[in-house]
Amino acid sequence: MTQAEHVGMNRTGIQMSPVDSKAMQDIDPSLKGESGDESALAEMRNDYIANADAFGSIPLPGSVTGAVNMGVQMLKGDSPQILLDKLGERLAFERTGTRLYDALITKCEVMLDGDISMTIEDLEHIRADEARHFLLVADAIESLGGDPTAQTPSADLAGVESMGLVQVLNDARTSIAQSLHAIVTAELSDKAGWETLVALADEHGLTDMVNDFTNALNEEREHLALVQTWYEESIGLTYGDVDLEAGTSTQPGQISP
């Protein structure tokens, strides 16, 4: 479905009413207050920042074994709390990712018309991957003695960050192209998150986790490549044979180095 934005009665720009816009800018000098700076406002903000509580905390392991393992790792100079925090982040994001694809599937069942290569089956496959990644991370947290139902600071942060993406996908007014734009944003963040997890697991010598997380990372890279292609198709973006400094494109949505 190629996106074709219609031209309508958009009156948000100042050029739509030159008379009123001029009147807004011609302020009576008597109404202007004394000029100043924002030092007082900045001082108030600085006080709030300096005295604010932390953005949540890492939960203590819910089992004796988990507590002992964490204590041993911290005595060795490791930082298991950072790994658990980032595992919590991925868990929250994979849950959200599953819901994003649920919303996109629902939208595509109504709007998809075959103009782009994406199919419902493609989306269901990615959605299944996201759900499987969620379970993978939950198992990893439990294997470290953590509680996958606890919300870590990074999990809380990821939830706040992804609120806008959820709103875009669930807004009945957004097109498939606009929805795919949000999905591309999610997949870019997801890929970066898995790269961090692989590095942290490797730093802690968790070979099995490194292998599992690397497989998930490779799947997320495939997701990203697919949704980027679908988004470009949805807005009618084709490179044809145009030379783009970095190389030439032989197919729509693909640039060869």
Image (spheres, rainbow, N blue to C red):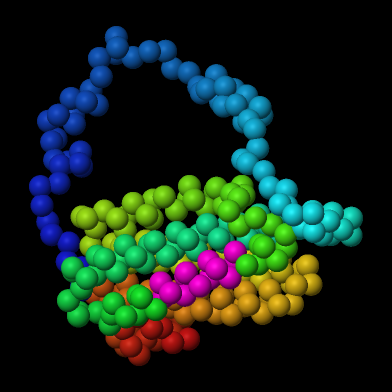
113 and 68: which is toward the camera: 68
Tell me where residue 202 appears, x and y as whole percent. 74, 72
Apparent side of residue 25 relative to residue 222 in the rendered image (left or right): left
Residue 176 visible here: no
Q: Residue furthest bottom?
A: 250
**Magenta region includes residue 12:** no
107 and 65: which is toward the camera: 65
Residue at 44 percent across and 63 percent down: it is 97
248 and 82: which is toward the camera: 82
For the N terminus, the image quarter is bottom left
Apparent side of residue 27 relative to residue 33 in the rendered image (left or right): left
Tell me where residue 2 appears, x and y as whole percent. 20, 73
Q: Is residue 248 above or below residue 65?
A: below
Tell me where residue 65 appears, x and y as whole percent. 80, 59
Q: Is residue 117 above or below residue 102?
A: below
Residue at 18 percent across and 69 percent down: it is 111
Quarter where residue 23 is shown? top left
Quarter where residue 231 is shown? bottom left
Q: Main secondary structure of the magenta part?
A: helix
**Total numbered circles:** 0
Q: Residue furthest top?
A: 30
Magenta part of the chain: 126-138
191 and 44: which is toward the camera: 191
Residue at 31 percent across and 66 percent down: it is 104
Residue 124 visible here: yes
Tell me where residue 132 appears, x and y as whole percent. 51, 72
**Magenta region includes residue 133:** yes
Q: Residue furthest front?
A: 64
Residue at 60 percent across and 50 percent down: it is 150
